[in-house]
């Protein structure tokens, strides 16, 4: 097929490299002013949550439209220290070791797959992989319970009306005054009135659309007590009836939610993860698995990408008539080729072009990366086909389309000690790629084929009658598609999105 560069590949704005150069040569005070402006003037359809590590603490910062940033420092093992249960301990080092063990075992099993001959061996192979899937699920559940706790509200997109927040704040303060500063017998524990809680924290706590567990409510209560004690108040925390207060807070939360007239919980979540946390599939925690989520390197990067989008939205719209694809260039993925080749060839009526079953030459590789959408089905990220041609390094491209790289570890970032992370996912971002779907670790071809097929189906571009409801963008499609694979966590959680959400437009023929 002819895959020479199209004359007009995209209908979203192209990165203005000169403008970026000028921005990043600004004096520090001007750069800080730009950052402060972005942090409070995000588009209305998104929030940003930054996660980083400081010693034995998790730092969480939330940026939301028309709100000041909220920042919290929480010990990774705070629940275990309160309850005194060693089996609840989940230090960061232990979580990273467990994740690495799961991935290494999965890689070993995947490599052994071709040598399986008997039905018994096949059943044993599947049992081992199902056990890994369960371990991954359990790890994410422990991270959510022990690390995030009540602060899951930072990921919420529910917008509460002002009067609802005011009413809940009054109810909450009344509960605290009647409980925290008095013992169960009614005896005063010191001051009869504490300082007023930050209204934005109360609003964020009340905005969580899910259900808090009893442990979550106790976590929030301990946060309040710690805040009062930091303000100089003496509180006998061992005499506080946490169960009673938790029940009363839950009742006030339910009242607030019933009074809420808005049910919008569709704000996109941007994750900024530091070098010690990027390896975890945060998107597959229960609080995020149904949400539109993507990863970005920094707030400055987000500012650059938002210039590609229409005003007051974080999404770009992609005209997929300029889609380019590279399918099974090594000719060793028979199942993948059989599943997608007929569809890709059928989509030529919309202008799709690509290469199937062979490696691209220089001009062809340039053409593949000059469209509006690039699909890659093969080993790794396909970077070897870029760097072996005159296209040179991906990050030096003048234009880079929205991309979906379905190969093993195509989105894995390499840790470089004290230096920034490195990998092809970031190379695509540096080249101007607005949105990239890729895998954090190695996956099996048939299961990742199911995931890719389900993503395309949810976007309405793959003919599959069993799914009638499409979703508006690529990140939501990915969230829905994780349910289509056999191993929801071992395979489904591997696929993540970098950059901003992309909405696909398929014109009628």
Image (tube, rainbow, N blue to C red):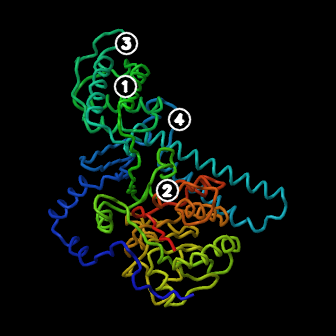
Q: Determine which quarter of the picture holds residue 168.
A: top left
- The residue labelled by disc 2 is 471
N-terminal label among 1 and 2: 1
Picture disc at residue 86: 4
Labels 4 and 2 touching (C-beta < 8 A) = no
N-terminal label among 4 and 2: 4
Neighbor class of circle 4 (other Cα within 10 Å; few <14, some 14-19, many 20+) is few
Task: Give the CA separation, mark 1 to mark 4.
Answer: 33 Å
Compared with 129, 442 (above or below) is below
Instruction: Indicate the quadrant containing the N terminus: top left, top right, bottom left or bottom right.
Output: bottom right
N-terminal label among 1 and 3: 3
Residue 229 pos. (x, y %): 27, 29
Labels 1 and 4 touching (C-beta < 8 A) = no
Residue occupying image coordinates x 51% and y 53%? 96
Image position of 28 (left or right of 81): left
- The residue labelled by disc 3 is 184
Neighbor class of circle 1 (other Cα within 10 Å; few <14, some 14-19, many 20+) is many
Residue occupying image coordinates x 42% and y 38%? 209
- The residue labelled by disc 1 is 252
Q: Secondary structure at mark 4?
A: helix
Q: Secondary structure at mark 1?
A: helix
Q: Secondary structure at mark 3?
A: loop
Labels 1 and 3 touching (C-beta < 8 A) = no
Please name which of the two marks, 3 or 4, marks the residue nearer to the observer: 3
N-terminal label among 3 and 4: 4
Picture disc at residue 280: none
Q: Secondary structure at mark 2?
A: loop
Image position of 271 (left or right of 380): left
Residue 57 pos. (x, y %): 38, 45
Labels 3 and 2 touching (C-beta < 8 A) = no
Task: Give the CA separation, mark 1 to mark 3.
Answer: 20 Å
């Amino acid at each position: 097929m002819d895959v020479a560069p199209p004359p007009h590949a995209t209908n979203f704005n192209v990165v203005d490299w000169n403008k970026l150069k000028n921005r990043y040569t600004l004096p520090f005070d001007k750069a800080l002013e730009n950052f402060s402006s972005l942090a409070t003037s995000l588009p209305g359809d998104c929030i940003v949550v930054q996660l980083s590590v400081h010693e034995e603490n998790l730092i969480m910062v939330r940026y939301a439209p028309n709100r000041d940033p909220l920042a919290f420092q929480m010990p990774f093992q705070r629940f275990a220290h309160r309850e005194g249960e060693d089996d609840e301990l989940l230090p960061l080092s232990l979580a990273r070791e467990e994740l690495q063990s799961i991935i290494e075992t999965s890689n070993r099993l995947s490599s052994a797959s071709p040598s399986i001959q008997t039905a018994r061996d096949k059943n044993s192979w599947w049992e081992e992989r199902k056990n890994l899937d369960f371990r991954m699920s359990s790890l994410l559940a422990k991270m959510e319970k022990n690390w995030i706790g009540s602060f899951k509200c930072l990921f919420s997109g529910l917008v509460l009306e002002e009067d609802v927040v005011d009413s809940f704040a009054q109810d909450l303060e009344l509960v605290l005054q009647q409980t925290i500063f008095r013992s169960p017998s009614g005896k005063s524990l010191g001051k009869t009135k504490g300082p007023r809680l930050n209204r934005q924290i109360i609003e964020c706590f009340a905005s969580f659309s899910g259900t808090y567990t009893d442990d979550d409510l106790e976590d929030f209560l301990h946060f309040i007590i710690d805040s009062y004690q930091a303000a100089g108040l003496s509180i006998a925390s061992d005499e506080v009836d946490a169960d009673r207060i938790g029940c009363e807070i839950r009742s006030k939360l339910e009242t607030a939610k019933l009074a809420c007239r808005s049910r919008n919980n569709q704000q996109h979540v941007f994750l900024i993860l530091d070098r010690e946390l990027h390896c975890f599939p945060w998107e597959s925690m229960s609080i995020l698995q149904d949400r539109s989520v993507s990863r970005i390197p920094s707030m400055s990067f987000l500012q650059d990408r938002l210039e590609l989008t229409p005003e007051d939205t974080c999404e770009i719209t992609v005209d997929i008539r300029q889609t380019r694809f590279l399918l099974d260039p090594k000719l060793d993925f028979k199942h993948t080729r059989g599943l997608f080749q007929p569809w890709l060839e059928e989509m030529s009526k919309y202008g799709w072009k690509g290469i199937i079953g062979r490696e691209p030459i220089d001009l062809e590789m340039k053409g593949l990366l000059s469209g509006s959408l690039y699909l890659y089905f093969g080993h790794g990220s396909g970077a070897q086909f870029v760097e072996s041609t005159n296209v040179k390094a991906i990050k030096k491209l003048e234009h880079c389309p929205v991309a979906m790289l379905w190969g093993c570890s195509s989105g894995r970032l390499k840790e470089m000690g004290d230096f920034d992370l490195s990998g092809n996912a970031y190379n695509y971002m540096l080249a101007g790629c607005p949105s990239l779907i890729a895998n954090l670790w190695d996956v099996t071809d048939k299961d990742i084929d199911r995931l890719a097929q389900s993503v395309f189906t949810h976007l309405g571009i793959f003919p599959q009658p069993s799914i009638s409801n499409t979703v508006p963008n690529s990140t939501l499609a990915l969230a829905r598609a994780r349910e289509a694979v056999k191993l929801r966590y071992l395979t489904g959680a591997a696929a993540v999105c970098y950059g901003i959400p992309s909405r696909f437009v398929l014109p009628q023929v």
